[in-house]
Image: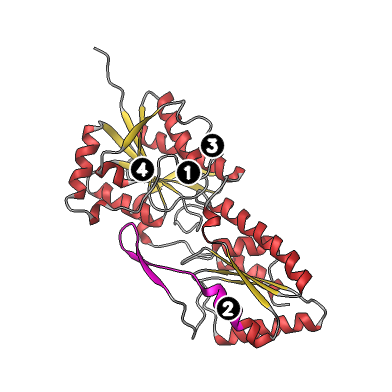
Amino acid sequence: MEQRKPRIGIMTSGGDCPGLNAAIRACAKTAIWSGYEAIGIHNGWEGLLEHDDEVLNVMRTSGIIDRGGTILGTSRVSPLRVENGVQRVKDRFNVLRLEALVVLGGNGGLSLAYKMFQQGIPLVGIPKTIDNDVVETDFSIGFQTAVQVATDALDRLRSTAESHHRIMVLEVMGRDAGWIATYAGLANGADEILIPEIPVTEERLEAICDKLKRRKNRGIYFSIIVVAEGAKLMGHNVLQEEHAGEDSPAPRLGGVGQQLGEILEKRTGIETRVSTLGYIQRGGTPVAYDRTLATAFGVKATHLIKTKKYGEMTSLKGVRIIGVPLAKVCDGIKTVNLSAYNVASKFFAQ
């Protein structure tokens, strides 16, 4: 009788981002070369609840390293919010004969993964989010691509801003952390960067307006401002809509860029235009950095399973790829290093 091979399950949970397919490819192929079978779980935890999965062989995972999105699909379904969901997941896990799961997720997805690990599901995590706000890792899959997309947009806005003598405001993603806004703004040389970590007081709004007027008086007839969607304009309410996240409702943000643009135009008298990147930041071909990071994370995740280091997450620390406890992901989010942000403020003050 032929001996059955051990099996590893792979899933993506939560929002998509560039680089997921590169990680799936690396994880599956490393598993296959290590004597495992790789099983792709469709649409996150929903796939285990609804018995939706497939075998990931070498052919299925070839030629996908440069593709955006995820060949497995994704969702924000949580077994903890479904009747008898945890037991249904365990039952399907056993039917598939899985040794462990690899869960690609952001803050919500990895926090949920840890809770499922506490429920008895052996698994490891891979951090992926364009927001780069997962703790215990320098970078997450998808972040560098999102920064490049935002930087390209800012570069294009600069030329039209200069031609029409306007203020251009670009709203980028970043609910609780302004990593994209900070890195893209620095790369573009934006005149102001507004992030959730530093609430925008009335005093700062006035200082920004004064600076923009000074630029015009000096003969610089355009300005570029990048604002994270979660930036807080103190004293000004931005409408938010509730939507269900992986484990709890969360506000759907948007509109701070438009509100900021209206304030700036009214107070400075300078024509102002606003653009919102939205989901454009999450789609398309991953840049080289995200492909290599995703590949390294995929290989490491499989090695963690081989050595039965369940309940850990792959992490980039300097130039090393290591495993760290998933429990630490639940401690909060990684906000922007303000010392790095303050380096740019020397230029913003002019």
The amino acid sitting under disc 1 is Leu
Query: Does any portion of residue 193 appear in the rendered image?
Result: yes
Of 211 and 135, the residue lying toward us: 211
Estimate the spatial distance between the alpha carbons at disc 3 and disc 4, rounded to whole Å: 21 Å
Query: Does any portion of residue 307 appear in the rendered image?
Result: no
Compared across the picture, whether 269 is left or right of 112 comes to right
Residue highlighted by disc 1: 20
Of 81 and 346, the residue lying toward us: 81
Specify start and end residues of the magenta stretch as a single range.
240-263
Q: Position of residue 101 (x, y in %)?
A: 33, 39
Estimate the spatial distance between the alpha carbons at disc 3 and disc 1, rounded to whole Å: 9 Å
Mark sitting earlier along the chain (3/1): 1
The amino acid sitting under disc 2 is Leu
Report the disc number at residue 65. 3
Answer yes or no: do the residues labelled 1 and 4 have beta carbons within 8 Å? Answer: no
Category of crowding for the residue at label 4, using alpha-carbon neighbours closer than 10 angstroms: few (below 14), some (14–19), many (at least 20): many
Local secondary structure at mark 2: helix
Category of crowding for the residue at label 3, using alpha-carbon neighbours closer than 10 angstroms: few (below 14), some (14–19), many (at least 20): many
The amino acid sitting under disc 4 is Val
Mark sitting earlier along the chain (1/4): 1
Local secondary structure at mark 4: strand
**Residue at 73% over, 70% down:** 161
Mark sitting earlier along the chain (2/1): 1
Residue highlighted by disc 4: 124
